[in-house]
Amino acid sequence: MIMNMMLIFIMFFFGNMIFISKHKHLLIILLSLEFIILSIFFLMMIYFSFIMNDMYMLMVFLVFSVCEGALGLSILVSMIRTHGNDYFQSFSLLY
């Protein structure tokens, strides 16, 4: 149980470190956000199974995380269609 919790916190920490560090591509940032969501899902799954509660909130969380992923991918596709790549250096809010 403690090893699982440590692994989940390490997953969350690495996901945040990838998100915070400076990357050039939007796809890497979206993948790190999904990795963070996955670690939070595992943490909630262990917590809800520990308190013997139903798993209904996990389904709601998964629905919201899928919506977040679809929104991120649509922004990525829109950015690639308008600018030709997913570099943040080529993306400007001025035009």
Image (cartoon, rainbow, N blue to C red):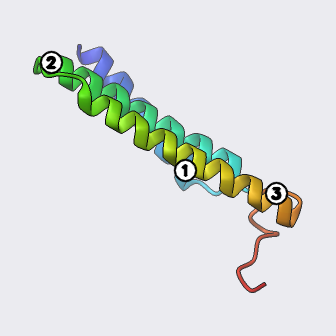
Quick one: 46 or 2, which is closer to the camera? 46
Q: Which residue is mark 3?
A: 80
Residue 50 locus on image (x, y percent): 15, 18
The residue depicted at 51 percent of the width and 48 percent of the height is 68
Q: Quadrant of residue 43?
A: top left
* Kind of residue indicated by mark 3: Ile
Pointer 2 local density, CA inside 10 Å: few below 14, some 14–19, many at least 20: few
Q: Quadrant of residue 38?
A: top left
* Kind of residue indicated by mark 1: Phe
* Kind of residue indicated by mark 2: Phe
Q: Which residue is mark 2?
A: 50
Q: In the figure, 16 relative to 95: above or below?
A: above
Q: In the picture provided, is 30 more to the left or to the right than 10?
A: right
Foreground disc of the pair 1, 3: 3
Quick one: 55 or 29, which is closer to the camera? 55
Residue lying at the far right of the rendered structure: 84
